Amino acid sequence: MNDQAPPGTRPARPYFSSGPCAKPPGWNAASLATASLGRSHRSKIGKSRLACAIDLTRQILRVPDTHRIGIVPASDTGAYEMAMWTMLGERPVTAVAWESFGEGWVTDAVKQLKIDPVVLRADYGHLPDLASIDQDHDVLFTWNGTTSGVRVPDGDWISENRGGLTVNDATSAVFAYDMPWPKLDVTTFSWQKVLGGEGGHGVIILGPRAVERLESYTPSWPLPKIFRLVSKGKLSEGIFKGETINTPSMLAVEDVIFALEWAQSLGGLAALIARSDANAAALDAIVDRTPWLGHLAADPATRSRTSVCLTVDGADEARIKAMAALLEAENAAYDIAGYRDAPPGLRIWCGATVDTADIEALEPWLQWAWDQTA
Ligand SMILES: Cc1ncc(COP(=O)(O)O)c(C=O)c1O
């Protein structure tokens, strides 16, 4: 252990966790609207705030009118499992995994639903050959692999004439990349990522082909109430107007409305994407200047611009933990050790709620932590 003095200037907001992520700049609890709190979520004001969150999401993500947006229980996992349990089993499935979260959906398809999917895998740092996917299958995939920093570059591999449904876990991706909505039958995410919202609720976006599946197919397995999107063979349309299946946290709803209004005030999706891109470029420049840092994502075209995963030359898990602990103790960077299932390394969130100046301010701190743990 060396004993160098720490650098003089800290990132102003050292929040680099990949989920929950930094709150929007300027956020404070006192600035949240509170009139819906302590009220029924089915009251006029409760429903109008839920509908407001849905409408702002549609505007900012530019979701076409063909697609429905619902707020559902249990964060992204709830939304994605809801899609799997209500829609799969009608036809063969391909499940694509290149890191821990995609692997989790594979596990549930294989071990819980027992639907014997074709599994297409790649190692950490790589993307499988998406062009090899049978377009008549339902396809389970993760747009941005949060634990490896590898993302799908675009939707070119999805056929407009596909027979199956695309089921897109986009939780670290929406609000940071353009989404090809006509090719996405189901998209899910949670609020605590690029928006810096709170965990607890998932968002599910259904295209017309997903609705058709829901109304024409009943799975052979039982469905708990919190997964049910259909009543008497018809889509429960109320869910997509803010009539949630069960009680939501209105505080989390007010918090995400704050984040969505912040996004709108910046100029919407293009501005959010520009902020993520600038952050990722600033981190890239640091990696270029630092011989002991590298990118886990081998191909720059598939490199995440939100959850950027870095290799640290020769460092084992113990050294990574020591570096992360030093940076946390100095309030220079919180939560930047890589995910527990990923190869040891650092993971630095570059989503839109992070300021580029804070990424830049990290550079001497990373060097300091490296030197201190030599
Ligand atoms: C790609 C991806 N999928 C799923 C999840 C799980 O999300 P949640 O905790 O919102 O259920 C995460 C969380 O980090 C994620 O990054």
Image: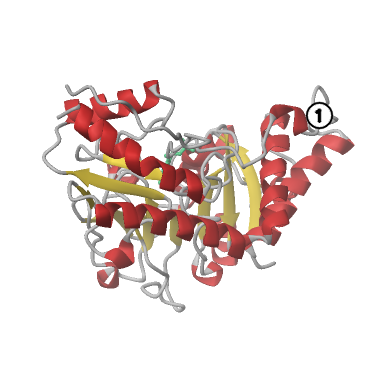
Mark 1 crowd level (few <14, some 14–19, many ≥20, 10 Å Cα): few
Task: Name the quadrant containing residue 57.
Answer: bottom right
Q: Position of residue 352 (x, y in %)?
A: 54, 51
Q: Nearer the viewer, residue 75 or 27?
A: 27
Task: Name the quadrant containing residue 101.
Answer: top left
As drawn, the residue found furthest toward the right would be 44
Q: Amino acid at mark 1?
A: Thr
Q: In which quadrant is the N terminus drawn? A: top left
Q: Position of residue 52 (x, y in %)?
A: 77, 48
The reply to whether residue 4 is visible in this rendering is: yes
Residue appearing at x 31%, y 29% in the figure: 324
Q: Is residue 37 left or right of residue 271?
A: right
Q: Is residue 342 left or right of residue 221?
A: left
Residue appearing at x 30%, y 33% in the figure: 337
The reply to whether residue 340 is visible in this rendering is: no
Q: Is residue 367 left or right of residue 350?
A: left
Q: Position of residue 37 (x, y in %)?
A: 79, 26
Asked which secondary structure carries label 1, the reply is loop
Task: Name the quadrant containing residue 207.
Answer: bottom right
As drawn, the residue found furthest toward the bottom would be 161
Q: Nearer the viewer, residue 122 or 262?
A: 262
Compared to residue 115, the image places residue 15 above or below, namely above
Q: Position of residue 107 (x, y in %)?
A: 29, 41
Compared to residue 51, the image places residue 303 above or below, namely below
Q: Which residue is mark 1?
A: 34
Q: In which quadrant is the C terminus drawn? A: top left
Instruction: Ligand 1: give its quadrant.
Output: top left
Q: Is residue 241 left or right of residue 353?
A: right
Q: Nearer the viewer, residue 197 or 92?
A: 197
